[in-house]
Image (tube, helix red, strand yellow):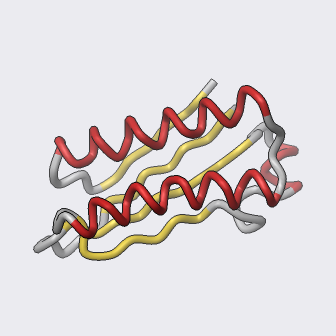
Amino acid sequence: MLSTKHNNVISKSLFKDVDAYCKLRIERVSIVQSNNEHVQFNVRKMISEYVETQQKNGKIENFKIICDKRNNNTASIAQGVKFEIIVIYKQTNCLRPTTLQYRLI
């Protein structure tokens, strides 16, 4: 099951686009692969490429994606989290960044 949280959503249309893309990638990867550094890198890369496209289109100023041992470690696995990714982006001309958190439980 995929659990999601989001904070500071400014543009709902941009959020829906980014959210749908992230969910699709996480769900596809989770079906066939386990959580390891290679999978984390590939998911991070796919989502980064998509968000970079939004940045080039002028919708996002900057972003950060966290999907590595900081949030995918033995402690989180012990709590039942199979996979976690956090996407933080700052929409163009906005002060607060939007945070999207995805947890595969």
Q: Nearer the viewer, residue 40 or 45?
A: 45
x and y, in percent, of residue 91 in the image: 21, 66
x and y, in percent, of residue 87 in the image: 46, 58
Q: Is residue 26 left or right of residue 95?
A: right
For the point 18% across and 75% down, the residue is 95
x and y, in percent, of residue 64 in the image: 47, 71
For the point 83% across and 40% down, the residue is 34
In the image, residue 22 above or below residue 63: above
Q: Is residue 36 left or right of residue 43?
A: right
User: Which quarter of the picture shows residue 21?
Assistant: top left
**How many numbered badges does the structure rendering display?**
0
For the point 34% across and 53% down, the residue is 7
Q: Is residue 42 left or right of residue 56?
A: right
| Quadrant where the N terminus is found in the figure | top right
Instruction: Identify the residue at the far left of this view.
Output: 93
x and y, in percent, of residue 74 in the image: 88, 55
In the image, residue 86 above or below residue 55: above
For the point 54% across and 54% down, the residue is 46
User: Which quarter of the picture shows residue 105?
Assistant: top right
In the image, residue 20 above or below residue 57: above
